[in-house]
Amino acid sequence: MYRAISILTALLFVSSLSAGKTSFASEETSSATTKTRISLSIETSQGRSVLRQLAVALAAGGKALSRFRGSTIENEEGKDRFNPPIPGMDCSVDDIANYVSCYGSAIGSEEEASDRFIRLIKELQAALPSDHWRGVETEPGIDSVRSYTYEDQNSDARIDIDLVPQLETDGEYSYHVSIFGWAATEPQL
């Protein structure tokens, strides 16, 4: 998702610089920008659909997460890749503890990472059934600078979103957005 937004930003910048060129070049840039916007819209739409399906499975508890299990992750007992993937996230399903964990790619600045964190919260808000799920910003978790939690009002299912700094070898920080989805312990019918 971050890469797609960067591409869109670059395309918009390039198109503004080339506005004085011929209308043919303008049409090509406009066409490329339109294709990128459509691609982002489809990616967001697919991500919301997957998030909505995940929320239903988490609230259902029990074996409901099994439909998201993809290939087994080597050297990680009890973990499978999350399938279908959430755009821009590397996710897995834990077979033993019955939860989903997702990690976004490293982002160089806290401001950009915070923007991604907020966009993800808005995507979840749009994807989750509002009559069941409630979200609230919470005290940052361990190693986090920002935390947000969605809870299902009819079960104990929960989705935690965190903005996590990571000290790199060069002494600078990068930031990651993580999601943990915890299934209901009592299946909801």
Image (cartoon, helix red, strand yellow):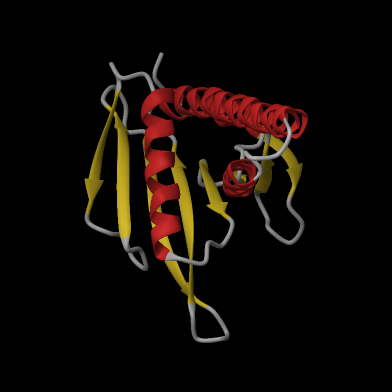
Is 68 on the left or on the right of 25, as rendered? left
Quarter of the picture containing the N terminus is: top right
Quarter of the picture containing the C terminus is: top left
Point out residue 127 in the picture as x, y percentages from the top left corner: 43, 24
Point out residue 180 in the picture as x, y percentages from the top left corner: 45, 46
Is 94 on the left or on the right of 121, as rendered? right
Q: Residue at x 45, y 57 (%)?
A: 112
Which quadrant of the structure image shows residue 140? Answer: bottom left
Is 155 on the left or on the right of 123, as rendered? left
Q: Nearer the viewer, residue 177 or 23?
A: 23
Q: Residue at x 48, y 72 (%)?
A: 166
Residue 39, compared with residue 171, is above or below; it is above
Is 84 on the left or on the right of 57, as rendered? right
Which quadrant of the structure image shows residue 151? Answer: top left
Point out residue 97 in the picture as x, y percentages from the top left corner: 51, 46
Q: Nearer the viewer, residue 101 or 166?
A: 166
Q: Nearer the viewer, residue 71 or 91?
A: 91
